[in-house]
Amino acid sequence: MTQFRARPPAVPTVLIDDAVVRVTRWDFEPGADTGHHVHGLGYVVVPMTDCDFLIEEEGGERRVHTKAGAVYRREAGVAHNVVNGGDRPMSFIEVEYK
């Protein structure tokens, strides 16, 4: 089956993946998304730019503005689609701990 996408995909670049952590840089054009996914590992996000997140979750969607450098953490099991809801490119580093 062909996967049709209305949004451009976010671009992941794995920076390190070893026995302890996986570190990925995510780059988003305006409107780009990760696609719906479930986090199998706990993780920390380090915004490299100001980020205007549109978070699509089972219960609906929400918008979150996060300043560059404002680090946050989430537990494994989070299920969502992350979208650049702003009009500028955005990027963040995701550190998953194993």
Image: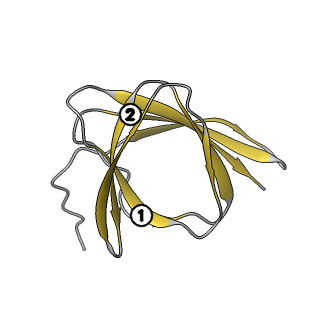
Quadrant where the image shows the C terminus: bottom right
| SS assignment at label 1 | strand
Mark 2 in CB contact with mark 1 (< 8 angstroms): no
- Residue on which the image places disc 2: 51
Please state which of residues 25 and 77 is positioned toward the viewer in this rendering. 77
Q: Which residue carries the number 1 mark?
A: 80
Q: Secondary structure at mark 2?
A: strand
Residue at the (69%, 45%) spot, across then down:
22
Q: Give the residue displayed 84% in from the left and 50% down from the top.
A: 19
Residue type at numbered disc 2: Cys
Q: Position of residue 37 (x, y in %)?
A: 45, 64
Please determine whether, in this image, residue 1 is positioned above or below residue 82.
Answer: below
| Side of 76 where 57 appears, left or right | left
Q: Which residue of the protein is positioned furthest toward the right in this rendering?
A: 19
**Residue at position x 63%, y 66% from top?**
40
53 relative to 23 in the view: left or right: left
Give me the residue at 23% from left, 44% from top: 8
